[in-house]
Image (spheres, grey):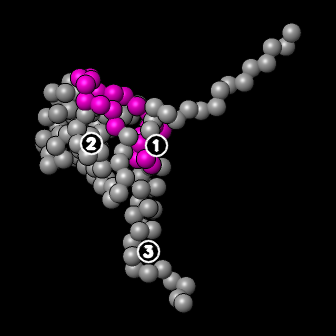
């Protein structure tokens, strides 16, 4: 048996490495960068220009603001993230093969703001409303 990875495994590892690099990048670590979710479903045929219109109309926000605007399709297996950086847009796209993302229902008109940490949880497949940290322990002295 060869100790080297098969071509398929090597490609899978490269994709995983890119995702990890993105999650740890300064993109989500900047203090002034906010993350907004578009509740409900979005037509994933929309590219940068179509998503910019949604940011202006639905989010009532500036697409050039260097914030992350996150969209999900009806089946909740695809996500797009629109981001302005210096002199151009980034459009990140993630497609799941067998599972679904947690996503807020479409009844809400206003965008939902989450933290960059919650975005990482969402991309990992966690329901961000169910993830809870340990409670802070406090001990009265007297």
3D distance between C-alphas at marks 1 and 2: 15 Å
Number of disc labels:
3
In this view, which residue lies farthest toward the bottom?
Answer: 1
Residue at disc 1, secondary structure: loop
Q: Position of residue 120 (x, y in %)?
A: 45, 44
* Mark closest to the chain's N terminus, 3 or 2: 3
3D distance between C-alphas at marks 1 and 3: 24 Å
Q: Is residue 135 above or below residue 120?
A: above
Residue at 25% over, 34% down: 40
Residue 9, disc: 3
In the picture of the structure, the residue carrying the numbered disc 2 is 72
- Residue 67 appears in the figure: no
Q: Where is residue 119 in the image (x, y as percent from the top left)?
A: 41, 40
Q: In this view, does 36 lie above or below 95?
A: above
* Mark closest to the chain's N terminus, 1 or 3: 3
Mark 2: few, some, or many residues within 10 Å (few <14, many ≥20)?
Answer: many
Q: Quadrant of the C terminus?
A: top right
In the picture of the structure, the residue carrying the numbered disc 1 is 126
The picture quadrant where one finds residue 15 is bottom left
Residue at 46% over, 43% down: 126
Residue at disc 2, secondary structure: strand
Of circles 1 and 3, which is in front?
A: 1
* Mark closest to the chain's N terminus, 1 or 2: 2
139 sits to left or right of 66: right
Q: What stretch is highlighted in magenta?
A: 103-126
Residue at 30% over, 39% down: 70
Residue 121 covered by magenta stretch: yes
Q: Position of residue 64 (x, y in %)?
A: 23, 35
12 sits to left or right of 62: right
Residue 52, disc: none
């Amino acid at each position: 048996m060869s100790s080297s990875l098969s071509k398929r495994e090597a490609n899978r590892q490269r994709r995983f490495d890119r995702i990890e690099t993105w999650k740890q990048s300064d993109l989500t670590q900047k203090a002034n960068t906010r993350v907004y979710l578009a509740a409900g479903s979005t037509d994933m045929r929309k590219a940068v220009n179509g998503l910019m219109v949604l940011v202006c109309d639905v989010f009532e926000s500036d697409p050039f603001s260097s914030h992350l605007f996150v969209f999900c399709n009806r089946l909740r297996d695809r996500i797009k993230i629109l981001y302005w950086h210096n002199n151009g847009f980034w459009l990140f796209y993630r497609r799941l093969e067998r599972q679904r993302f947690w996503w807020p229902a479409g009844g809400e008109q206003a965008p939902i703001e989450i933290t960059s940490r919650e975005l990482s949880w969402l991309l990992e497949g966690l329901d961000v409303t169910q993830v809870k940290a340990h409670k802070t322990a406090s001990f009265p002295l007297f």
